[in-house]
Image: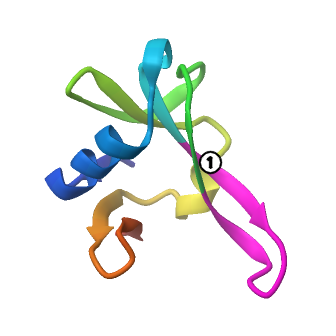
């Protein structure tokens, strides 16, 4: 399992997520409520603790903590920018 991030998504993260001293961006399962109740991908600045899945670009580590891999079906994660909605989209292979 690995994370691959397109340059357009990297630019989005750099412009929209302030990592400060955390120096990392974590992808995790997030419960949503309302008309679209379910589980989605949460994003937060964080320091990796038990991460087996990560990639570092421009000194920022993008990672999934151990135990959260199920969200991506234990497959490689490809992150691109959805230009229509101007937000990251996640595809697994």
74 sits to left or right of 16: right
For the stretch drawn in magenta, the main secondary structure is: strand
Work out whether 53 lies above or below 11: above
Over which residues does the magenta segment extend? 27-41
Q: Nearer the viewer, residue 15 or 74?
A: 15
64 sits to left or right of 38: left
Q: Residue furthest front?
A: 15
Residue plotted at (27% across, 55% down): 9
Write down the quadrant of residue 18 in the picture.
top left
Measured as percent of width and height from the top left, residue 80 is found at 28, 64
* Residue 38 highlighted magenta (yes or no): yes
Measured as percent of width and height from the top left, residue 39 is found at 71, 68
Q: Nearer the viewer, residue 34 or 2?
A: 34
74 sits to left or right of 57: right
Work out whether 47 lies above or below 6: above
Q: Residue furthest left?
A: 7
Write down the quadrant of residue 88 in the picture.
bottom left
- Circle 1 packing at 10 Å, graded few (<14), some (14-19), many (20+), is many
Measured as percent of width and height from the top left, residue 68 is found at 64, 46
Residue plotted at (32% across, 82% down): 84
Quadrant for the C terminus in the image: bottom left
Write down the quadrant of residue 37 in the picture.
bottom right
Residue plotted at (35% across, 69% down): 86
Identify the residue under disc 1. 28
Residue plotted at (25% across, 46% down): 10
Check disc 1 and report its element: helix, strand or loop: strand
Measured as percent of width and height from the top left, residue 1 is found at 39, 49
Q: Residue furthest bottom?
A: 35
Work out whether 4 lies above or below 36: above
Q: How many numbered marks, from 0 up? A: 1
* Residue 22 highlighted magenta (yes or no): no
């Amino acid at each position: 399992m690995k994370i691959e991030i397109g340059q357009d998504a990297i630019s989005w993260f750099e412009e929209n997520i302030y990592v400060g001293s955390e120096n990392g961006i974590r992808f995790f399962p997030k419960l949503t409520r309302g008309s679209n109740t379910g589980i989605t991908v949460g994003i937060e600045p964080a320091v990796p603790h038990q991460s087996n899945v990560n990639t570092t670009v421009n000194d920022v580590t993008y990672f999934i903590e151990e135990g959260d891999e199920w969200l991506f079906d234990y497959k490689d994660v490809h992150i691109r920018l959805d230009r229509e909605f101007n937000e990251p989209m996640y595809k697994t292979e």
